[in-house]
Amino acid sequence: MYSYLSCWDGLYSDKYYVNLFNAKQEGIMDIFIIVVTILLIGFLCYKGVPTPIGGVACTLILLVYFGMNIYDGLLTTYMGGFVGFVQKWFLMFLIGAVFGKIMDITGAADSLARAVLRVVGEKRISLGICIVSALFIAAGISVYITLFIVLPLAIKMCRRANLSRCFIIAGYSLGINIGLSLPFVAVANNVLCTDYFGTEVSSGGLLAIFCTAVYAVVGMLWITYYERRMKKQGIGYVPAENETAAEDSDLDNADLPHWIVAVVPMLIPILALNILKLQVEFSLILGVAAAIILQIKYLPHKWEPIKNYFVESINTTTATVINTSAIVGFGTVITATPGYEVAVEKILSINGHPLFTALISVTLIAGVAGASSAGIVLAAPVLTQILPLTDAAVFHRTVIYGSLGLDSLPHAGFLQTECNLAGVKFKDVYLPIIFMETVLMTLGMGVLYVLINIVFGLA
């Protein structure tokens, strides 16, 4: 009995509270609360809670725990980060959305997709979808718009080849990660890194292209293997509700521009960025202007449909930017907490090469946030402190590779969207396709890039 009471006496002794106090002083609880709120915002997104609501809720938790002024925290700190992101990036997203819409309504995207499929063969559906998706992403068109452009033709080709719809996701996932990881392109992640690290969109150069090519080859080998396995099991195309074969003939008889007319406007932003060194917004505007001039025959000539297309582009852009800004605002609050300074010290004290520190940090944050751009935005302010320890261009590309790993965990809302639109069950494609291609293989691409730079003393 005495020893039992002694245990309780020890539990409530001054020494116990001193230990708790020391733990708090060391920032363990501070870091724990930050991690919990990041996980919570990811969970809320997974459950369909609007990102701005989740961002404000998690911000309140941080403000209350750290004893910060709630009014200033919401109106100044949170909204400051929110509005700052909108001010800096809304125009780029909007121009990209308009660019994608023009490519879609003129049929230029469809024409390019058909040209690619003629080259690779109509039975290599995943490869065709991969190439087309990578081209659109590299041209600065968002992942959402690319999905809407590619999807109709991809469904038609899968139906013709009696191939499961899951290979729409296979080709698309591989393609967007190729487009997002390439240097020289006007991709949001690439441009974000130039802003934070003072680098250029060409950072990474030929080595980055080589590592991305390795990723593409490994990805296609896996898709080919999985396709053969599904064919052996007799799994083929399954029509969606109310789907009719008439859709094929409608697409076949469409009057489309030549595929070169589609390619030229996509090349112009890349050339303007890397040769003329123009700002990304001006580069995309040149692409839009080229698309209008070359494809004007296929554009509507009445104001009403033009107005509707602009409204659709604005709505798409607004939703995308607001959701990202909500994460940025939340990240701004995190950086204002005392726990953030402790977390910075812990990250910077990791014994290892700064490139591996960057790769691990960004991919973990992108994983809990469920978005690659959010991973860059939240990690970059910390990583700028170790940037001087290595080559800036290599560091830039490493951060991008890191952002493309764990951002595709199940709570990432976009994954649910693409599966629903493609007409496949999430559980059927996540592990064999999405996880393999967009988590394991992209992380492998990042590790390969870092190892080559370290082994050959390039960084």
Image: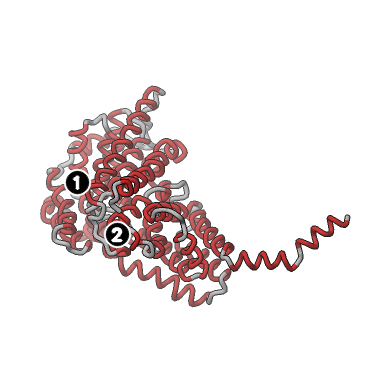
Q: In this view, does 385 lie above or below 295?
A: below
Q: Is residue 72 left or right of residue 315?
A: right
Report crowding for label 1: few under 14, some 14 to 19, many 20 or more residues within 10 A (C-alpha): many
Residue beneath label 2, please? 392
Secondary structure of residue under mark 1? loop
Q: Which residue is drawn at 44% across and 56% down?
A: 365
**Picture quadrant of residue 319:** bottom left
Q: Position of residue 70 (x, y in %)?
A: 53, 75
Q: Where is residue 198 in the image (x, y as percent from the top left)?
A: 28, 64
Q: Position of residue 36 (x, y in %)?
A: 55, 58
What label sits on residue 107 in the rendered view?
1
Report crowding for label 2: few under 14, some 14 to 19, many 20 or more residues within 10 A (C-alpha): many
Instruction: State whether residue 420 appears in this view.
Output: no
Give whichever of 387, 58 is nearer the camera. 387
Q: Where is residue 168 in the image (x, y as percent from the top left)?
A: 33, 38
Label 2 amino acid?
Ala
Instruction: State whether residue 162 appears in this view.
Output: yes
Q: Residue at x 76, y 66 (%)?
A: 13
Upstream in sequence: badge 1 or badge 2? 1
Q: Which residue is drawn at 48% across and 51% down?
A: 46
Q: How is the image coloured?
A: secondary structure
Label 1 amino acid?
Gly
What label sits on residue 346 in the rendered view?
none
**Picture quadrant of residue 200:** bottom left
**Picture quadrant of residue 275:** bottom left
Give whichever of 211, 410 is nearer the camera. 211
- Which image quadrant: the C terminus? bottom left
Direction right: furthest residue: 1
Secondary structure of residue under mark 2? helix
Marks 1 and 2, how far apart at CA: 41 Å
